[in-house]
Amino acid sequence: MKYLHTMIRVSDPDATIAFFELLGLKKVRQMDSEKGRFSLIFMAAPGDEDAQVELTHNWDEKGYDGGRNFGHLAYRVDNIYETCQRLMDAGVTINRPPRDGHMAFIRTPDNISIELLQDGHLEPAEPWASMPNVGSW
């Protein structure tokens, strides 16, 4: 398993980027989705680019309240199907199953989202391919 990033939602990406740059982080990449109406901006400390902060800007949001600006922690796993099966066997609910062979979401006992990412994509496999989402992530 490899730590990838922590995601936070931001209302003003320019101000947030400037804040993290003051801390010494640099923008390592950005993805803008016209269709999804969001931007993902990844920041990291120079020399530690593997540990990133993902700034998610939803273009149409009207402000976050109640802690909705914290998103999730993300980890890359060796085999997403085996990892999810091991977690499910231990009683963990898979909120967003890895139907695509690439991504799943689970929650900690304190309800914090954890994103699990396969490096690349595995072929869709049962029971995951037909498993419905259990909750929000």
Image (cartoon, rainbow, N blue to C red):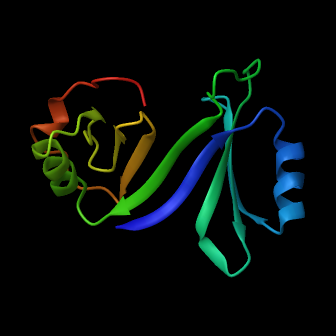
- Residue that lies at the very extreme toward the front in this rendered image: 110
Instruction: Say which residue appears at 69% left-offset and 66% top-offset.
Output: 44
Q: Say whether residue 48 is visible.
A: yes
Q: Position of residue 97 (x, y in %)?
A: 26, 37
Q: Identify whether 112 is placed above or below 41.
A: above
Vertical position of residue 118 compared to residue 85: above or below: below
| Residue at the image position 64 percent from the left and 77 percent from the top | 48
Percent x, y of residue 62: 76, 17
Q: Quadrant of residue 36?
A: top right
* Residue drawn at the location 25% of the way across and 39% of the way down: 99
Image check: 53 left or right of 24? left
Q: Residue furthest bottom?
A: 47
Residue 119 visible to an observer of this rendering: no
- Considering the image in quadrants, where does the N terminus appear? bottom left
Point out residue 93 in the picture as x, y percentages from the top left corner: 23, 34
- Left/right of residue 55 with respect to residue 72 in the rendered view: right
Q: Quadrant of residue 92?
A: top left
| Numbered disc total | 0
Quick one: 38 or 19, which is closer to the camera?
19
**Location of residue 22 with respect to 66 vertically, above or below:** below
- Horizontal relation, residue 59 to residue 134: left or right: right
Q: x and y percent of residue 3 in the render?
A: 46, 64
Q: Quadrant of the C terminus?
A: top left
**Front-lying residue, 54 or 118:** 54
Which image quadrant for residue 21?
A: bottom right
Name, please, the residue furthest toward the top. 62
Residue at horizontal 18 percent and vertical 52 percent from the top: 81
